[in-house]
Image (cartoon, rainbow, N blue to C red):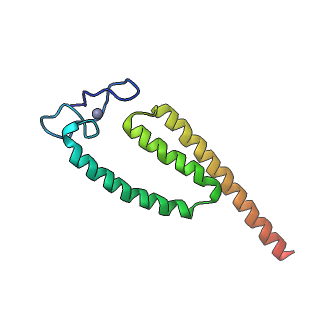
Amino acid sequence: MTCTATRLDGQRCTASILQAGSTRCFAHDENLQRQRAEARRKGGRSRAKLVQLRRLMPIALVPVFDQLAAVLAELHSGECDPKVAQAMASVARAMVAVLERGELEERMRALEERSA
Ligand SMILES: [Zn+2]
């Protein structure tokens, strides 16, 4: 059983119905306001975890991380085309690979300078 609501992009929502007797998914069921408020509160908590993770990453990746986090939320609400998200994820992976490569070379250079 899938949700009967229409997403913001005009497509039919494809999420499963969790609540027995409902015709809408968790995100679209207006009778689930209280649970949704609770989920938002928990989301706030996981956002705190995101903020912690954010501190661990190279400065250059912070905007990418923020953008991917926003895309994740948009994907869930149906505002973002999964194909767009897929493309963004692969560009982000490429960026990480380039940065890793740069960092590695910087370390190598530092080691070579030390041994010279
Ligand atoms: Zn739905």
Q: Looking at the image, which residue is at 12% across and 35% down?
A: 21
Q: Quarter of the image holding residue 76?
A: top left
Q: Pinpoint residue 44: horizontal percent, then vertical percent.
A: 37, 56
4 on left or right of 52:
left
Q: Quarter of the image holding residue 106?
A: bottom right
Point out the residue furthest to the left here: 21
Point out the residue furthest to the bottom here: 115
Q: Quadrant of ligand 1?
A: top left
**From the viewer's perspective, is residue 109 above or below residue 63?**
below
Q: Quarter of the image holding residue 17?
A: top left
Q: Pinpoint residue 93: horizontal percent, then vertical percent.
A: 58, 47
Q: Looking at the image, which residue is at 58% across and 48% down?
A: 64
Q: Looking at the image, which residue is at 70% across and 61% down?
A: 104
Q: Pinpoint residue 101: horizontal percent, then vertical percent.
A: 69, 55
**How many numbered markers are drawn?**
0
Point out the residue furthest to the right here: 116
56 on left or right of 24:
right
60 on left or right of 72:
right
75 on left or right of 99:
left
Q: Pinpoint residue 80: horizontal percent, then vertical percent.
A: 45, 34
Task: Work out which quarter of the rendered image holds the C terminus and state it.
Answer: bottom right
Q: Looking at the image, which residue is at 52% across and 33% down?
A: 84
Task: Work out which quarter of the rendered image holds the N terminus and state it.
Answer: top left
Closer-to-camera residue (100/51): 51
